[in-house]
Each structure stands twice: as C-alpha cells, then as structure tokens.
Amino acid sequence: MNTIDTSESHALSLDAADSLAVFRERFLLPPGKIYLNGNSLGAASKDSLASVQRVIAEWRRLGIGGWMGGDPPWISFAEKVGAMAAELVGARADEVVATGTTTLNIHSLVSTFFQQQPRRRKILADELTFPTALYALQGQVRMKGLDPGEHLLLARSADGRTLDEDGIAALMGEDVAVALLPSVLYRSAQLLDMGYLTRAAHKKGIVIGFDCVHSVGAVPHDFTAMDPDFAVWCSYKHLNAGPGSTAFLYLNRRHFDEPPLLCGWFGYEKERQFDLETDFSHQRSAGGWQVSSPSILAIAAAEGALKIVLEAGIERIRAKSLGLTSYLIGLVDALLADPPYSFRVASPREPERRGGHIALERDEEAMRVSEALKGMGVVVDFRGPATIRIAPAPLYNTYHEVWRVVRCLKEIIDRGLYEGQARSRKAVP
Ligand SMILES: Cc1ncc(COP(=O)(O)O)c(C=O)c1O
C-alpha cells in the first residue's frame, strides 16, 4: 500500500531538512521556470561563470602569455581539470583528461583497442545505448574493413527499456575485442552493474569501456576499485559546465603504453611537445589521447562546475538524487497512475539500479503532455514515442519543485491542457 504524504507541506518540510539546499543559490536558473532538464543540459552556475571570466581576463591581459602565465597555466589546464574529475570518479590524477567530445573520445579510445587487435574482430554494445555510440562503433568496424552487421554485436533488451547484465555477459566471446556500454541508459535511467560487466569482460580478455555521460556527477564511481579499461563522459549534463562544453576521457594506467591512433600534437610527450618533431611519441598518461589545442574557455566552465560538485560531495549528491526521484515515483504512483492520468514509471524502482532521472510513460498523448508542461514553465524533455524524462538535480532542484511538477501533470490531464498543443515535434529537445 502506498503511504506517501502527498501534501505540499510535506514537500516543504523535506526541503527544510535538505543539507544541499544551500547550493541552489550558486546557480543561475532560467527565470520563472521549474528546470528539471539537467540530464540534457545542466544549469549555469556562478562558479562556472567566474572561472570563464577569469580566463577571459587572462586572455585580455596576457594574450598568448596565458599558456604559461595563466593561473593556472593554460598549457596544463586540461590535465589539471582532468585531475579534479579523477577525484570525482575515483581514478588516479593522470588517468583523466578534459578533452574533446564524448563521441570523439569514443573514436579515439576504441580505435586504440580495436584497430590494432589482429585476432579479435568484434565490438560489443547494446541496442539501447545513445545512438552516437553506435554510429561511432559502426565507423570503427568499417575502418577495419569489416561489416557492422556481422562485427558489431548488440545486446538486446527484452522490454525495450532495460538491459540484462547476464545477457550482455553471454555475448562476451573470444572474438570480441572491445565492449562499450552505457553506465546509465539515457531513456529509462537504468544503472548497469558496471563492476559485474567489467569482471565478465576481463575473464574473456575483452577490453571494456563505459559511456558515463548519464552517471558522472549523479552517481558515485570508483574506477580504481572497479578497474575498467576506459570511460568517457561529457560535462554539460550532471556536471553543469554548459552547452557543448568539454568532455572527459579516462584511461586505466595499465594502457598508457598503447599507441593512440587519432594522434595530434597535444597528445605529444609534454616535455618535448614544442620540439615539433615529425615523428609522433605520445605522453604516457590520459593526456596522450588529446588531439588538438584544449578548449580553454570550455575547460574553465568545467573547472567551476566541478568545484561545486566536489564541495557538495558525490555521496551526498547521490543520496539527495535518490531522495528526489523516489519522492517523484511515490507521488506518481499515488496521484497519477490510475485513469484518466495513466502515467507509468519506466525507470527501475530499485534505487541501486537507477541513475539521476525518471522516465514517465503514457500511451496516449505523451508528447503533447510534455509540451503542455513546457507551456506551464516546467522544463523537461520528451523522447518518442511516449517517454517524458524528468531530472531533479540535487544541487539546484527542490522537493517542492517535484511536488509542483506532479501537480502540473495532474492539472494538464484534468483540464485537457495538452489538447491545445501541436502534434508535431520541434527539431531541438
Ligand atoms: C549517453 C550519451 N553519450 C553521448 C552523447 C553525446 O555526446 P557528445 O555530443 O559529447 O559527443 C549523449 C548526448 O546526449 C548521450 O546521451
């Protein structure tokens, strides 16, 4: 029986007891909105803007001198902010660098482990992963002169929402070189058992990497204990570093001597980079997988954003995230499950199997319901055919906002407010 207290005063009392509530004032939230879209684009923070302003001031004052004279110097800024991210994911400082984009980093790391592997000719992924990973992997298979239909194995989902770790492990054969899997699924928010998958892959001699875009900043990681081979993630979702901001790349130390294939001058041995030799020799750290000049302004935004996350502490962030999503599930079950509301929670209900957002499904009119929500100032996103994703961010959202979004959904159905919305989707989220 559901015994959740659905009153507004209860929501307010949860906020009053929230030790992370103080962080909300560090953010600059879109005025007049309930912003619940941090799984797509996290909110701006004063700390991020201050870091960017500092670098802009250095650029004005020092010009090119900022590469050595910035504070910290721009020349090693990608590694410095990488070390901050390493602290967050339980990696060693030289195993993480701020570089590139998630998709580019997938190419860079998978090429290292796939193109140079003569015997094993398959890559393992899954059908629910964010498609950019599949596009990149198809390209990697083709670059090796192989057919993705045969050489890119996809673990299938029984219910279209979740994956079964045993089913994935069953596909880990002797012919697989690399497995690339998501930590948290972008639609349902299922959190995979990464430790189990890593052990299963290593038993079969497979190199395993994770796309952690939907977990870093929301879920604690301990890469040193878990020991995966590589990982990639962006900074613009749960890390709040701004649109298209830098991505991060983790490479386990045991692979530092592997040669990168997407070589570029910023991956050159640090001490000798400016000798400008014609033969490439990479830095023995994650930094060796950099390609081009680091995006200093973007990395500055990530520096400021990471400062907040590290200060708040990922364990506390996770605890509040689960508090918010469990509260949302409870309210949906109590108030929105029965007809005429008919919303279903499509995310795992077990907290340990859930990332930082909740997927709500509704067979009828889900897209127009999500548009109606936007019309009421609630920012969420829609993934067809019937999924509304709601991401209460522990650093800047409140229990009261979760309570309000449920009230808005109820009102949309009670008053048929979705009927005024267009039936076609706009191109952008
Ligand atoms: C799981 C996942 N991986 C990768 C990406 C795209 O990353 P990028 O644009 O940095 O290549 C996204 C975008 O939403 C995503 O959800």
Image (tube, grey):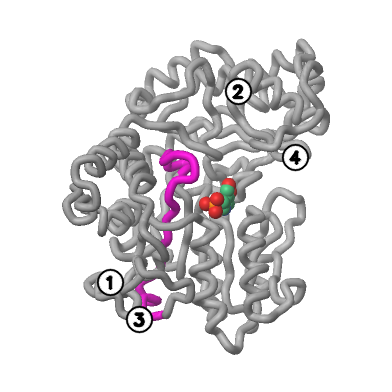
Q: Residue 278 carries which label?
A: 3
Marks 1 and 4 sit apart, C-alpha to C-alpha, by: 47 Å
Residue 159 placement (x, y as % from top left): 76, 51
Camera-near label (4 vs 2) is 4
Residue 121 visible? The answer is yes
Mark 4: secondary structure: loop
Marks 4 and 2 sit apart, C-alpha to C-alpha, by: 32 Å
Considering depth in this image, is 197 or 5 the residue closer to the camera? 197
- Vertical placement of residue 184 versus 275, above or below: above
* Residue drawn at 43 percent across, 50 percent down: 246
Determine contact: label 4, label 2, CB under 8 Å: no
The reply, left or right, for residue 169 in relation to residue 282 is: right
Mark 1 vs 2, N-terminal side: 2
Residue at the spot of label 4: 384
Marks 1 and 3 sit apart, C-alpha to C-alpha, by: 11 Å
The reply, left or right, for residue 291 in relation to residue 412 is: left
* Residue drawn at 72 percent across, 72 percent down: 148
Residue at the spot of label 2: 3
Considering depth in this image, is 302 or 253 the residue closer to the camera? 302
Marks 4 and 3 sit apart, C-alpha to C-alpha, by: 50 Å
Residue at the spot of label 1: 273
Residue 218 placement (x, y as % from top left): 46, 43
Marks 1 and 2 sit apart, C-alpha to C-alpha, by: 63 Å
Residue 39 lies in magenta, yes or no? no
Mark 3 vs 2, N-terminal side: 2
Mark 2: secondary structure: loop
